[in-house]
Image (cartoon, rainbow, N blue to C red):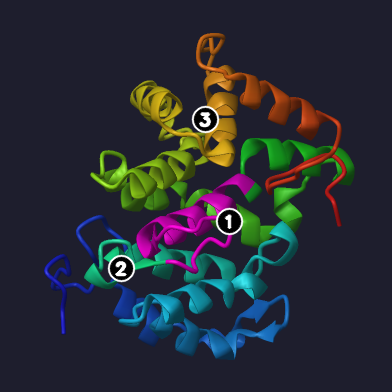
Amino acid sequence: MKSENQQTDGSTSDGLPHHEALLDGTDWASLGTARGDGGFLPAVLIRLLDVDPAVQASAIRELEPVCHQNSFYEATLPVALYVAAILIHPATATVGSGLLTELERGYPVRAALLDWLGSLAYDADDKCVAIGERHFNGGYLDDYPEMRAFRDRRPTFYRAVSPFLGHHDADVRDAAIVAALPLTEHPDLTWHQDELGRNARHLLATSTNGYNRSRSLDALKNWGYDTTNLETADDIAARNQRVRGGNWAGGCMDEPPF
């Protein structure tokens, strides 16, 4: 059955292939992951749309082999496209208490999926590429087609994420903002940074989530914003801790913690 956003060509209104087309049209068993081939993935991806948020949360965790140790595999891009395509699906509006272990209250499945996409975007951002170039003496992306393929599709992912930048649910909205920040490094998307900067400033005025605040502050600084009046004492303490090598939360470092 087609959703209301599915077009006659099997794509969604944002240009993504429809999630069912991706699921049925991908030879998952031919794609590599950190733990063998991707033959297990169709069952996991279907569970992302289960009616039970606990099942959905478990399925999100089961995606770990396609992004193990912040790396990209043959299955990473197709899975990411599927996740992006289901963001508009009504099943992702469910709320579960087990999606984020550090939060006692419920957390929307849609926000958790945006977090997952955002983590990939940070693992493929310009900083990660620069570090790779230094460690591998140039030609990093030539030898890493899986990451290059993801980076090439950043406009697609941005189109899937951007409708949620003004979402009424703060968790969904903030997850979308943080996911969008690294995507706009793509040359075709940099013009979005002024507007996205306003979104990030709003996040910093309303959110106490340390990870989201850190990502927003880093982006604003990189884009030339004065963040002096936006940082809190906790932000500064967390930044100093990261500099000392603690509280690593994904993305690239010169010496990753593995």
Give the number of callouts: 3
Q: Which residue is mark 3?
A: 216
Which numbered disc, 2 or 1, marks the residue that appears first in the sequence?
2
Q: Quadrant of the N terminus?
A: bottom left
Q: Quick one: label 1, few (<14), some, or many (20+) residues within 10 Å?
A: few
Q: Quick one: 103 or 185, which is closer to the camera? A: 103
Q: Which residue is mark 1?
A: 102
Pinpoint residue 127: horizontal percent, then vertical percent. Answer: 69, 36
Q: Amino acid at mark 1?
A: Glu
Dot 1 falls on a residue whose secondary structure is: loop
The quadrant where residue 200 appears: top left
The quadrant where residue 91 appears: bottom left
Is residue 174 depicted above or below 6 in this figure? above
Q: Quick one: 146 or 204, which is closer to the camera? A: 204
Pinpoint residue 150: horizontal percent, then vertical percent. Answer: 55, 56
Q: Amino acid at mark 3?
A: Ser
Dot 2 falls on a residue whose secondary structure is: loop
Q: CA distance from mark 2 to mark 1?
A: 18 Å
